[in-house]
């Protein structure tokens, strides 16, 4: 695999980001061949290979230019950035895009039945976490002195083992907390997936493909919620109908053969179209309303 001509993208091997990351790449048109348990996926139709790694390793792989690009959670990225700052270094990976998946939050959670009256209640407490730098930053900003108990995993059982009074951990569905009788009380960081790139300039061929990939990612993100609406309407109802079409700039208006008073409206709506919208459109005079998913869009 030629480092001079093929882009290398780091993706989480198994976890919250794995499936949506692969789904995104798939929507961008990438065909990956990957043997079972293989660390490297080979891009068959693009000069782009995917390295499957632990998410915690992604910031360094990109920063050290082992990989050109990485898809990683903001939570992991922030923790690494603060850690480097604490060591007097500077994080140099560049964030290219904020992506609409991998949503979760880093939160403080206390054992059920504990009284918690805002961040001030944290004073003097022992907080178990795998995110010591992000937590320290949060506490520092609020002038709170608490003890951070840094663990490498299984944070949720720390209070029961008597190792901590509360925890600071990632929450997405909340089922881990619930199973461990913990209650979320404060959000420390809202997280989602981001695309990062190496600080090192890319050779021209790779750069061109990186740009193409970005454009496709933008296209994919754009159409996610987009719908194509077609409907018939009385010409007189057009102003009302245009107001009802969610997030559409300029609909196409086509005369309807044989009925001068009626037109056909085609519009791309950049927001989801709900039943309520259709009902309002109908009330405004629309008929023959058709809503189609948009597969690709290139602005
Ligand atoms: C986090 C966290 C919990 C779980 C919470 O781990 O440590 O175990 O997710 O999710 P839930 O609210 O849906 O139950 P993660 O899978 O991110 O592991 P990692 O930190 O090793 O990447
Ligand atoms: Zn991890």
Image: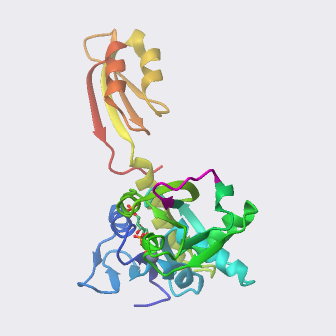
Image coordinates of residue 70 in percent, x first then y, are: 49, 74
Image coordinates of residue 149 in percent, x first then y, are: 58, 77
Q: Is residue 128 above or below residue 190?
A: below
Q: Is residue 203 visible?
A: no
Q: Is residue 248 above or below residue 253?
A: below
Q: How many marks?
A: 0
Colouring chosen for the image of the structure: rainbow
Q: Find ligand 2 in the image and state its quadrant.
A: bottom left
Quarter holding the N terminus is bottom left
Image coordinates of residue 251 in percent, x first then y, are: 43, 29
Q: Residue at x 62, y 69 (%)?
A: 134
Q: Residue at x 33, y 67 (%)?
A: 19
The span picked out in magenta is 110-118
Q: Residue at x 43, y 38 (%)?
A: 271
Image quadrant where residue 46 sits? bottom left
Q: Nearer the viewer, residue 122 or 24?
A: 122
Q: Residue at x 60, y 73 (%)?
A: 79
Image quadrant where residue 82 sits? bottom right
Q: Nearer the viewer, residue 284 or 59?
A: 59
Question: In the displayed structure, does residue 95 sit left or right of residue 243?
Answer: right
Q: Nearer the viewer, residue 101 or 175?
A: 175
Q: Is residue 165 visible?
A: yes
Question: In the displayed structure, does residue 167 sit left or right of residue 54?
Answer: right
Main secondary structure type of the part rendered in magenta:
loop
Image coordinates of residue 217 in percent, x first then y, are: 45, 60
113 part of magenta stretch: yes
24 part of magenta stretch: no
Q: Is residue 296 above or below residue 293?
A: below
């Amino acid at each position: 695999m030629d480092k001079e001509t093929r882009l290398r993208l780091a993706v989480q091997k198994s976890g919250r980001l794995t499936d949506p990351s692969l789904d995104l790449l798939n929507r961008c048109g990438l065909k990956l061949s990957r043997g079972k348990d293989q660390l490297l996926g080979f891009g068959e139709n693009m000069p782009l290979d995917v390295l499957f790694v632990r998410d915690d390793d992604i910031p360094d792989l990109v920063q050290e230019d082992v990989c050109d690009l990485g898809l990683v959670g903001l939570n992991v990225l922030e923790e690494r950035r603060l850690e480097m700052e604490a060591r007097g270094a500077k994080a140099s990976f560049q964030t290219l895009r904020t992506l609409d998946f991998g949503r979760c939050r880093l939160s403080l959670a206390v054992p059920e039945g504990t009284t918690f009256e805002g961040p001030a209640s944290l004073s003097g407490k022992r907080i178990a976490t795998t995110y010591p730098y992000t937590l320290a930053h949060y506490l520092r900003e609020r002038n709170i002195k608490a003890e951070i108990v840094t663990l490498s995993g299984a944070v949720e059982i720390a209070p029961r083992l008597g190792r901590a009074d509360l925890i600071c951990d990632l929450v997405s569905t909340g089922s881990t907390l619930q199973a461990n009788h913990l209650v979320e009380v404060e959000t420390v960081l809202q997280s989602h997936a981001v695309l990062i790139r190496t600080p090192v300039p890319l050779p021209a061929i790779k750069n061109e493909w990186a740009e193409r990939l970005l454009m496709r990612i933008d296209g994919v993100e754009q159409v996610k919620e987009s719908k194509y609406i077609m409907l018939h309407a009385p010409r007189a109802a057009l102003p009302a109908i245009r107001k009802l079409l969610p997030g559409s700039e300029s609909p196409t208006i086509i005369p309807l053969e044989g009925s001068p008073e009626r037109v056909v409206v085609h519009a791309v709506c950049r927001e989801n179209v709900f039943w309520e919208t259709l009902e309002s459109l109908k009330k405004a005079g629309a008929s023959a309303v058709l809503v189609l998913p948009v597969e690709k869009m290139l602005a």
